[in-house]
Amino acid sequence: MTSLDNTIYQPRSVAADELVPSRYAVRVGEIDVMVVSDGVLPLPTAMLAHNADPTVRAAWLDDMFLPPEAFDWSLNVVVVRSGAQTILIDAGLGLDPDLNLPRAGQLIKRLNAAGIDLASVTDVVLTHMHMDHVGGLLVDGVKERLRPDLRIHVAAAEVEFWKSPDFTRAFMPPGFPDALRSTAKRFVKEYHSQLRQFDEESEVAPGVMVRRTGGHTPGHSVVRVASGGDRLTFAGDAIFAVGFEHPDWHNGFEHDPEEAARVRIRLLTELAGSGEQLVATHLPFPSVGHVAVDGKAFRWVPVFWDY
């Protein structure tokens, strides 16, 4: 693993209020990968496992030294450079003043601080179209800074789902269903001509594959980066911090909770077998680690940071 902040990327001056790390770079063979923090999203802890016994959930939170009622979910986005292509995987929350989430939606300024010009982005891959994955491209002035031939890769099943989304099996706080629906609708309207839809999988760039998993949403996808024998998977929302010990617990944003659990177990089993690196949207920043088998469940093994 190699930090690329002072080599491939050219960081610009960081504002005085940016006192926490917000980017972390790794190397996957010949491919550069940078995890960028979009901030944090405060949500009720019940969202982690609404099908679990509240006392069992409370015990897990206590064991993890986490507050019992609400805590901050990390929002991680990934930038990949493969050959001549610069690929943004997911786009963060953007701005939604109606939900009062001021510590999220930091992506654009943090890309700028990392020296990543929006005009250099050739491709965007969306793991799915929840607002915390597409909203950054809806911030005022962003579309004008993107190249006109930008390709946005997304599963066709995801686009179809958001035409008439069904939230009957989700478990979300008030306001979120309407915000999710309106953001997805606006995104498709703004970027329809640039969408590159795929059915099951697609090669975005040499060594960069996106594959539909379903579960979390019908078109939810993961991205695998492979080069020179090294591999890294960006799992989007297929894996949450609680999902290693309790992969059968249902997250409140899952549109098919049982299928999401099956997807999670399959993916964790694959990652434990391959030993490759894992990054996921809502694991604590920078979320780079490995998966180990732990009895009948799994264990997350964070990497030692490389400076």
Image (tube, helix red, strand yellow):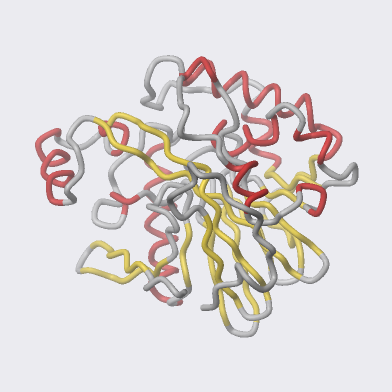
> Is 125 situated left or right of 237 in this image?
right
| Residue 219 can be seen, yes or no | no
Residue located 58% across and 26% down the image: 95
* Viewer-nearest residue: 16 or 252: 16
Numbered disc total: 0
> Is 242 situated left or right of 66 in this image?
right
Residue 168 position by quadrant = top left
Residue 217's place in the image compared with 221, above or below, is above
> Is 23 situated left or right of 124 in this image?
left
Residue located 65% across and 59% down the image: 11
Residue 180's place in the image compared with 253, above or below, is above
Residue located 68% across and 52% down the image: 88
* Viewer-nearest residue: 21 or 247: 21
Q: Find the residue positioned furthest to the right.
A: 148
List x then y, in percent, for residue 123. 77, 52
| Residue 290 can be seen, yes or no | yes
* Viewer-nearest residue: 77 or 261: 77
Q: Find the residue positioned furthest to the front.
A: 16
List x then y, in percent, for residue 293. 28, 70
> Is 191 situated left or right of 90 in this image?
right
Residue located 30% across and 38% down the image: 48
List x then y, in percent, for residue 82. 74, 69
List x then y, in percent, for residue 143. 79, 34
